[in-house]
Image (spheres, helix red, strand yellow):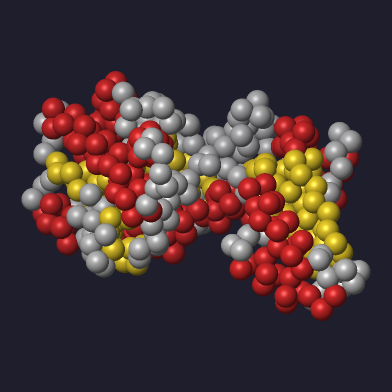
Amino acid sequence: MKLLVQKFGGTSVSTQERRELVVDKIESAVNKGFLPIVVVSAIGRKGDPYATDTLINLASSVGIKNNPREMDMIMSCGEVISCVVLSNTIKKRGYDNIVLTGGQSGIITDEKYGDAEVLRVEPHYINECITKGLIPVIAGFQGISENGEITTLGRGGSDVTGAIIGEALNAEAIEIYTDVEGVMTADPMIVPDAKVMNTIYYNEVFQMAEYGSKVIHPRAVEVAMRSSLPIFIKNTMSDSAGTLITNCDKNRRYRYDKSDKLLTAVAHVGGRARVRILFNGSAKEYENDNHLFNAIASEGISIDMINVNPEFKLFIIVDDDIEKLETVLNKYGYNYEIKKNCSKVTIIGNKMRGVPGVMAKAISALAHHNIEVLQTSDSHTTISCLIESEYTNTAVNALHQEFELGKTALSE
């Protein structure tokens, strides 16, 4: 029997009307000869009665510091509630199903509460349910430790649940349903002519997620990539084909890349600060790379866009880490400057690998709009430019236009 994992986000199950649309998708899969494995997020978003943030606020209302273990317990409830409500809607249509928690599904994790890592999946119970003809309705975002502790997988963890279940069951594909038509060339709230992509490669969408796009969790892409599992990003509220995330499909079993574009997308992320540390003797014996970066790492501060020079060190951090970093640098007497209110804008594309002039073209596009590039970093498939946050929208539009991502519909 062909298995298809269908993951539905919080907005997809937020109302009874939308839950009926979810069952339409499940029914369609059955009619095509699949047995669906359904993974569900908590109902709605912040402010909705059973959303994860609502449950967190409920636990916090007492006014004491939350215990991570107990927080995972209450956060896991949102998905369970969602599953039971959706299960009844599916049963009303005449389809037998069974609700399973992450633990009952065999998702075994470590005990890093709030952001647990999946150690393995033991899908024995799921397979038993499938054998009986039951549709498993699985609570996303959660698992269980070796000691029986309930754990959660971090924000966006239901995507990870869908991917690891798909991998463990050797599913045909994974469908991730949300409230957008698919993966787009840029944020449509910023770029009016952003297009839905027909196909995108694993590493490209992984880069998009890493550099600010919030279409799918990066860890879910990693799982699918190592297992060569096709992922479809689709809209619950429409019948559009969505976007296929895959490697090059030589047999053209699904779809193949028909785009001749050099780039795939433009992503952006704000809330960044540029740090410049001078090595001019002020920190004395502590003025060496080994001590500096170890001191920063020991405080759990992540750095990015790193430029190491004998006379200065340049990198960026998230705004939330500024105070912690200042404490470290002041402790050892470093001479430093911090520029706040920065954004990182990134162009992404497999086909730019080895092509000369891409950086020059990007810098030129930004310069045309008088946008100063504060710093750059690049890989084989990405080029990132650090700019002042007030120019973010202009920069994203300029790069999207320069590389003609909106001129030809990539969804043809």
Q: Is residue 282 above or below residue 179?
A: below
**Rendered residue at 27%/35% (across/down):** 82
In the shown orientation, is residue 55 left or right of residue 269?
Answer: left
**Rendered residue at 74%/70% (across/down):** 292
Out of 262 and 4, give the one closest to the viewer: 4
In the shown orientation, is residue 283 left or right of residue 320?
Answer: right
Quadrant where the C terminus sits is top right
**Residue 409 seen in the current view:** no
Out of 292 and 177, give the one closest to the viewer: 292
**Rendered residue at 85%/62% (across/down):** 335
Out of 47 and 136, give the one closest to the viewer: 47
> Whole-percent x and y of residue 115?
42, 56
| Residue 307 figure quarter | bottom right
Q: Is residue 194 above or below residue 170?
A: above
| Residue 294 figure quarter | bottom right
* Residue sitting at the far top: 17
Tell how many labels.
0
**Residue 67 seen in the current view:** yes
> Whole-percent x and y of residue 160?
39, 52
* Residue sitting at the far left: 132
> Whole-percent x and y of residue 315?
75, 58
> Whole-percent x and y of residue 302?
63, 60
**Rendered residue at 15%/28% (across/down):** 93
Out of 235 and 136, give the one closest to the viewer: 136
